[in-house]
Amino acid sequence: MSNIDESPRSILYQTEDKTTTLVDIPSSISEAQGTPDNPCMDMLWSPPPLEKPYPSIEPNSHKAKQKVQASLHLGDLIQSTFPQDLLVQGLADIRAACAGRFCAKRKFANQQPASKVQDQIKSGTPQPGEGIMEETVTVACHADRGFVIGPVFQPRKPLFLPSSATSDGYEAVRMTDVVSRVVSNPFVQPTQLLVLDTAQKYKIPPLSTFMLSKVGQQEASLFSSAAYKLLPEPSISAAPGQFDFILLDPPWENRSVRRSKNYETQRKANDDPMDVLQEMLEKHIAPNGLVACWITNKKRVRDAALQVFQAWGVELVEEWAWLKATVHGDPICPIDGIMRRPYEILLIGKSISPAIDSYEDLASEKPTEKRLIVGVPDIHSRKPCLKALIEPIMANKSDYRALEVFARNLTAGWWSWGDEVLKYNWEGYWTKAEPLNIT
């Protein structure tokens, strides 16, 4: 077991080789809002952590299982190359090393009917910590709390936030000032935004840059132009406008997304965002840069992600699994289920030269490093923030450029892009700091 005292506070356990990690999801996000000189010690509101696995939806018999599998298209079959024995062994290792529960202390939100939350938002008086449970998150927090993201008509200069805020402690802006425009906090101190149209306030981390927009053709052109404008000089490892690490969480369509209806999936979008990124993002990947992409467990989704990697000249080098567990360390559903599995996969590739000749070179599944992340689920769509986990494998962890696409929160020192990019930076999601202890 590694020395936890020297680890980020969101990492509750980690093996010496960093291949198995127990992470607390809310604190991984709050930790990433600050820097060593200006740490963020506030806490996110969360639902109560899961005590028991979800009720099983798996077929009861072998014959029923075969019938379900026969009814699915090949591309919709659950398929994962992550070894199940590593998942089982990783959980066992954590249980042996940790006497407590599998998450840190959380601040529980007060549950309210969705209608009441909606009325509060319309009146501009939502109460912090209220109405953000799973069943009300769509009403309370979808589309960054009321931002209207319309078509882009003309490019605008990046907006640089001032180092000093207004007298009430916030930089006041109009909705049109920040939508479909690159906004940057270039200072080492955090700042805050007050959106006058909705009376909503947002926490903006130090040295963070974001673009609140859809990922479409016009928006991609705006983003690309701004990246060259704001990053005009080469770094140690990247050319102008390039990033050493790019993280993507595309809206792959699956059953849970269709049920929740929380965000637009690729099939419903006018522009397939991955097609858009396939065309524009390659020029923003630094030589030897890393690209990470979250995928579902469907074969067609994995194939699509690998095809995009191939188009960018990115070779698959690592594969991580985020295993969702209860507070007692049990998987939230069967590890080998055919209807759903308790883990999501992160593919990590490295930009290589020359570019990969064919998709088959990636599909051959060359040996890759496998790492396991275990975490107790939080609000729907909140994934572990990877900043503390990715930095140890960066060539220069103290001086790198990072971009997260389809982001749902900002990260200090990173660029973020997506139509929910300010979602979890809304002030109402946050509460005063308390000591972070394993409960």
Image (cartoon, rainbow, N blue to C red):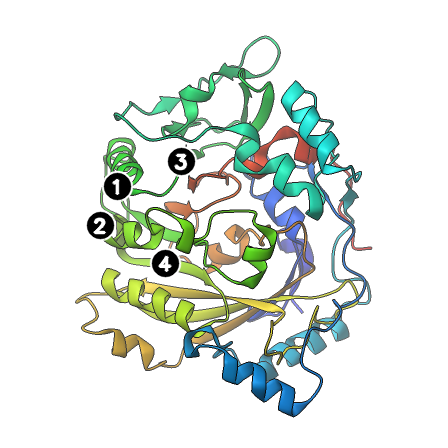
Residue neighbourhood size for the residue with mark 3, other residues' Cα within 10 Å, grouped as few (<14), some (14–19), many (≥20): many
Q: Nearer the viewer, residue 415 or 379?
A: 379
| Location of the N terminus (image quadrant) | bottom right
Q: Could you tell me residue 60's position as x and y percent?
A: 71, 84
Q: Disc 1 residue type?
A: Gly
**Which residue matches tag 4?**
291
Front disc: 3 or 4: 3
Judged from the image, the secondary structure of the residue bearing numbered disc 1 is loop
Front disc: 3 or 2: 3
Mark 2 vs 4, N-terminal side: 2
Q: Disc 4 residue type?
A: Val
Residue neighbourhood size for the residue with mark 1, other residues' Cα within 10 Å, grouped as few (<14), some (14–19), many (≥20): many
Marker disc for residue 170: none
Residue neighbourhood size for the residue with mark 2, other residues' Cα within 10 Å, grouped as few (<14), some (14–19), many (≥20): some
Q: Disc 2 residue type?
A: Lys
Q: Nearer the viewer, residue 152 or 280?
A: 152
Residue neighbourhood size for the residue with mark 4, other residues' Cα within 10 Å, grouped as few (<14), some (14–19), many (≥20): many
**Which residue matches tag 1?**
241
Q: Is residue 380 visible?
A: yes
Judged from the image, the secondary structure of the residue bearing numbered disc 4 is strand
* Pointers 3 and 1 in contact (C-beta within 8 Å): no
Front disc: 3 or 1: 3
**Which residue matches tag 3?**
213
**Which residue matches tag 2?**
283
What residue sits 21% from the left and 70% below the top? 356
Q: Could you tell me residue 434's position as x and y percent?
A: 77, 39
Residue 29, compared with residue 251, is above or below; it is: above
What residue sits 68% from the left and 54% below the top? 5
Mark 3 vs 1, N-terminal side: 3
